[in-house]
Amino acid sequence: MYKLEVRNTNKIFKKEGKEVFALKDANMQIEAGKFVSIIGPSGCGKSTLFNIIAGLLKPSTGKILLDGKDIVGKNGNVGYMLQKDLLLPWRTILENVILGLEMKGVSKKAAVNRAVPLMHKYGLGGFEHHYPDELSGGMRQRAALMRTLLYDQDIILLDEPFGALDAQTRLLMQTWLLQIWTDFKKTILFVTHDIDEAIYLSDEIYVLSPRPGRIKEKVTVPLARPRNENTLLDQAFITLKKHLFELLKDEGDGLNKAN
Ligand SMILES: Nc1ncnc2c1ncn2[C@@H]1O[C@H](COP(=O)(O)OP(=O)(O)O)[C@@H](O)[C@H]1O
Ligand SMILES: [Mg+2]
């Protein structure tokens, strides 16, 4: 059985009498423990797809199966870091990290006992009592990811988590994320519009067409793990990069825009 299945899922938004077809016949089969990316131009429906999987939006038609059970319209089954997921500025980093645990009813003491060693292990040690605006962008994203991780679901959805970071920080964060993924054995769904990032991180990549988002192709990444900077120079990396570039180039120039 697949960990997650998206079956014949469509989404049409109705706005001021007009219809926007955001997602068309999406089908995905995700195996447990995989790292799967979704790439496609801005506005093609990537965040919409995540909102549907997370149960925050209902699809117009179609199903979302988690461990074989339909979870359409039900939230709380996946960890979800939204595209503009902000830390609460009035809470310390530690208080932000334990937010998900607190929402699940875990006592503050138990949540802190769980979170502090993880913060130390994963590069946030010493920042527990700082406030978000005292941290760099990369550290803030670490904290937001740690919060999502501690929500304790098998699947984590990450919507362009590194989009606003500079190239050097981004590479550090990607390696950091791969370490977390290896240690915690989660299934990760990752949205990006960066081809290199998708290849570097993923086992599989779904390529979406411009709106209405339609799955154009699913590719398997033929690169061994663990990966490091040398992976970026591997011939298989470059070949796949060219292929994805061609797939996305057909589709106009939306690729480098934010969102
Ligand atoms: N709540 C909404 N109401 C109407 N249209 C929406 C809504 N949310 C998204 N859309 C439209 O659906 C399309 C896909 O949006 P989105 O999923 O955010 O794209 P992406 O994340 O790939 O950039 C866009 O044209 C967007 O304007
Ligand atoms: Mg988006």
Image (cartoon, rainbow, N blue to C red):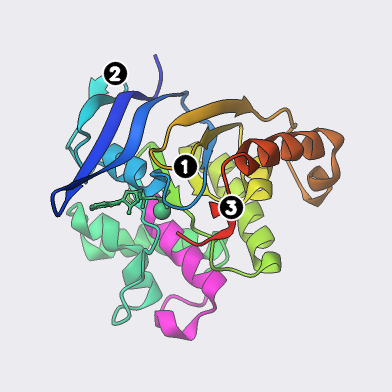
Instruction: Check if residue 195 falls in the magenta segment.
Output: no
The label on residue 49 is: none
Question: Residue 175 versus residue 112: which sits nearer the camera?
Answer: 175
Does any portion of residue 99 appear in the rendered image?
yes
> Separation of disc 3 and disc 2 at Cα?
38 Å
Q: Amino acid at mark 1?
A: Pro
Which numbered disc, 3 or 1, marks the residue that appears first in the sequence?
Answer: 1
Q: Which residue is denoted by mark 1 in the rendering?
A: 210
**Residue span colored magenta:** 125-149
The CB of the residue at mark 2 lies under 8 Å from ligand 1: no
| Image coords of residue 104 (percent x, y) | 20, 52
The CB of the residue at mark 3 lies under 8 Å from ligand 1: no
| Image coords of residue 234 (percent x, y) | 85, 39
Q: Which residue is denoted by mark 3 in the rendering?
A: 253
Q: How dense is the environment of label 1, judged by Cα within 10 Å: few (below 14), some, or many (20 and up)?
A: many
Residue depicted at 67% across the width and 61% down the height: 172
Question: Residue 149 versus residue 21: which sits nearer the camera?
Answer: 21
Q: Amino acid at mark 2?
A: Gly
Residue depicted at 54% across the width and 62% down the height: 163
Left or right: residue 172 versus residue 132 is right
Which numbered disc, 3 or 2, marks the residue that appears first in the sequence?
Answer: 2
Instruction: Give above or below for 77 relative to 65.
Output: below
Q: Amino acid at mark 3?
A: Asp
> Separation of disc 3 and disc 1 at Cα?
10 Å
The label on residue 68 is: 2
> Separation of disc 1 and disc 2 at Cα?
29 Å
Residue depicted at 37% across the width and 48% down the height: 47
Please identify the quadrant where the N terminus is shown: top left
Question: Residue 159 versus residue 144: which sits nearer the camera?
Answer: 159
